[in-house]
Image (spheres, grey):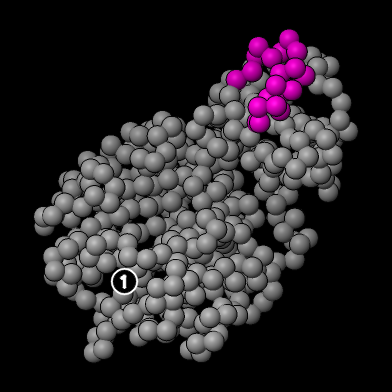
Amino acid sequence: MLTTSLLRLGAVGALLLCSAASVHAQAPAEPARVKWERLCQIRRDQFDRILPRAMRDHGVDMWIVTQKENQFDPMYEDLGRGYVGSVAYWIFTDRGDRIERAAIGVSGYRYEQCGYDLVRGFAPLQDFIKERNPKRIAINMSEEVGAADGLSKTMHDRLLKELGPFASRVVSSERVVSDFRSGFPASRLVALGEAGELSRRIAERALSNENIVPGVTTLEDVAWWMMDQLQQRGLGSSFEMPSVYITGPKGIEATSNDRIIQRGDLLIIDWGVGYLNTWTDVKRMAYVLKPGETAVPKGIQAAFDNALKVRDVIRRTIRPGPTAGDMLEQLRGEIVKAGFRMQGTFNEVSADDKVEVMIGCHSVGDRGHGSGPSIAWFNPRQMTFPIKPFNPFSIELFAWTPAPEWGGAKVRIPLEDDAIVTERGVEWLYPINQKIALIK
């Protein structure tokens, strides 16, 4: 157990990610060269396996991503980073037998050896485009999908001017970007599984007596400890400061602030880890035992068990093929058949004895909230996208169950772990949450 002073400063621990199946403690962050080699392999696989279909399924002959110095497009990491001295263009052209990849005006470490066919200094575009004569040119502008909306107003105007007579052939890259970023080859699925394993292990350590002394430790102490874990390992955070919160009879009481953790509290962590340009969204829970208690109170445990039943319905229902919106309707029907009631408006709880459910199985992987199809009310545009094999999803749900320990008020149980959807259905990427942890 940590002392109070160490809790305030943030404890020093370590987890080294060695492979999808092995995480060892007390080791440094991954070497920079190894990280680059793995990112390079992912990039090649994305270009070879994912990009052709992403462009051809939407009738796009050319996709142009632009960037000014210090004005980063959301695709910057995916395309290999690099230095832009003035203006740069990443241009992907369907040449029939393959997608040609050109980087113009950008220099990066071994661009020529890591996915690109043509790397050159800045040059006017019209001759380049005239030679290829694309019928539809996708550019990064989208009303709702942020990853496909990287063009500033001035860069948009400049690009259309550069395109000249080809400007009339411009379309939104929204669906190309969505399919490219949410189509995961095996090399990237491995990275996402490793990121998920790190996410859940750090969260589970955070919600334990290793870090929490009831009556002493604050929610903020736990959140900062988690941030220290990311910093020590060179990892990113999907949502900046982790949400470490307490839920009670009136809902969420406090989040990542100076509220001191007390006995009887029901704690939740909601957060995500960024590793090799993959990003997770994971929750874990813990109950702080009161004097004389040895287990989670029966009403709270019953609420958790109901959430597990809902998750099982989701797991056996989701399949590729339908749009995310159609799948949401299927899920609603199956959840009602299982004896639950779908909640009308999120977090608006009815004063009755019914178990209420809300689901938000959103795209994940390219960010904590990703660019692909989302079975979630908060991504209306992405609900119109079809679910494809090997799309990553955050399997997120909320279940509210009345508990006598809370005077009949409903216990809000959130579950969230990351998975991929295959023809076989939902397949988990790491051990998912199966219990409420205990803090003594």
Q: Is residue 385 left or right of residue 100?
A: left
Amino acid type at circle 1 is Leu
**Magenta stretch: helix, strand or loop mostly:** helix
Residue 247 at what x, y percent from top left? 31, 65
Question: Residue 238: x percent and y percent?
Answer: 54, 55
Residue 190 percent coordinates (x, y): 58, 56
Residue 326 visible in this rendered orientation of the protein: yes
Q: Residue at x 73, y 49 (%)?
A: 40
Q: For the C terminus, which image quadrant?
A: bottom left
Q: Residue furthest front?
A: 258
Which residue occupies 56% across, 47% down?
366
Q: Which residue is mark 1?
A: 266
Residue 117 in view of the camera: no
Q: Is residue 411 magenta?
A: no
Q: Is residue 149 above or below residue 433?
A: above
Q: Is residue 77 above or below residue 52?
A: below
Most distant residue in the top direction: 165
Disc 1 secondary structure class: strand
Q: Is residue 166 magenta?
A: yes
Residue at 81% over, 40% down = 84
Span highlighted in magenta in the image? 151-171
| Residue name at image x 55 percent, y 29 percent | 142
Other-residue count near label 1 (Cα within 10 Å), few / some / many at <14 / 14–19 / ≥20: many
Q: Nearer the viewer, residue 85 or 134?
A: 85
**Residue 21 position by quadrant:** bottom right
Looking at the picture, how far across and down is residue 70, in whole percent?
A: 75, 43
